[in-house]
Image (tube, rainbow, N blue to C red):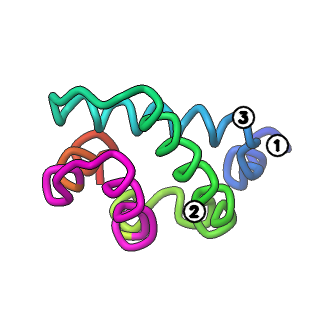
Amino acid sequence: MKHQAANHNPQLPTARKIRRSCQAELYRTIKRLKVYILPEKVEQAETIYFKKVANHAVWLHENRSNRKKQVDWWEENVCDELVAVLEVDREEFVTAFRAAYGG
């Protein structure tokens, strides 16, 4: 029975898991944009994204079953900084992220 309870209340993700998830989400988003972005810029964007997610890990964990709410948070709190670093169109970036993330 303890095993079932653990599935209903999983622990917060580790920093490694957060970093890898952010990298994967950003990669899938950029791939959908079909534009070349310098690796240095992608790395800088990954760092920004990771820090934002890590700082809000508790809220994101509490809303883990509501991807739309998570994407709305991302658009309000993360998107503009990533757009500035990556130098991409905001609307296209948001559309690509929503498609990649599923929200």
Q: Which residues are magenta?
A: 73-93
Mark 1 and mark 2 lie on one chain; the one further toward the N terminus is: 1
Q: Which residue is mark 2?
A: 60
Determine the secondary structure under disc 2: helix
Residue 3: quadrant of the picture: top right
Disc 3 crowd rating (10 Å Cα; few below 14, some 14-19, many 20+) is few
Question: Given the image, on which type of amino acid does mark 1 rest?
Answer: Met
Residue 80 to residue 96: above or below: below
Residue 45 shown left or right of residue 91 in the figure = right
Query: Which residue is at the front of the view, 88 or 33?
Result: 88
Q: Nearer the viewer, mark 3 or mark 1?
A: 3
Residue 50, given in percent of the width and then of the height, sits at 60, 48
Question: Given the image, on which type of amino acid does mark 2 rest?
Answer: Leu
Give the numbered dot on residue 71: none
Magenta stretch prevailing secondary structure: helix
Q: Nearer the viewer, mark 1 or mark 2?
A: 2
Residue 45 shown left or right of residue 4 in the figure = left
Farthest residue, direction right: 2
Residue 72: quadrant of the picture: bottom left
Q: Nearer the viewer, mark 2 or mark 3?
A: 3
Disc 1 crowd rating (10 Å Cα; few below 14, some 14-19, many 20+) is few
Residue 13, given in percent of the width and then of the height, sits at 71, 45
Question: Given the image, on which type of amino acid does mark 3 rest?
Answer: Arg
Q: Which residue is mark 1?
A: 1
How much space separates mark 3 and mark 1, taking CA atoms? 29 Å
Magenta stretch encompasses residue 54? no
At 39% across and 50% down in the image, what residue appears?
A: 85
Q: Which residue is mark 3?
A: 16
* Residues at marks 3 and 1 touching, judged by CB atoms closer than 8 Å: no
Magenta stretch encompasses residue 74? yes
Residue 103 to residue 76: above or below: above
How much space separates mark 2 and mark 3, taking CA atoms? 16 Å
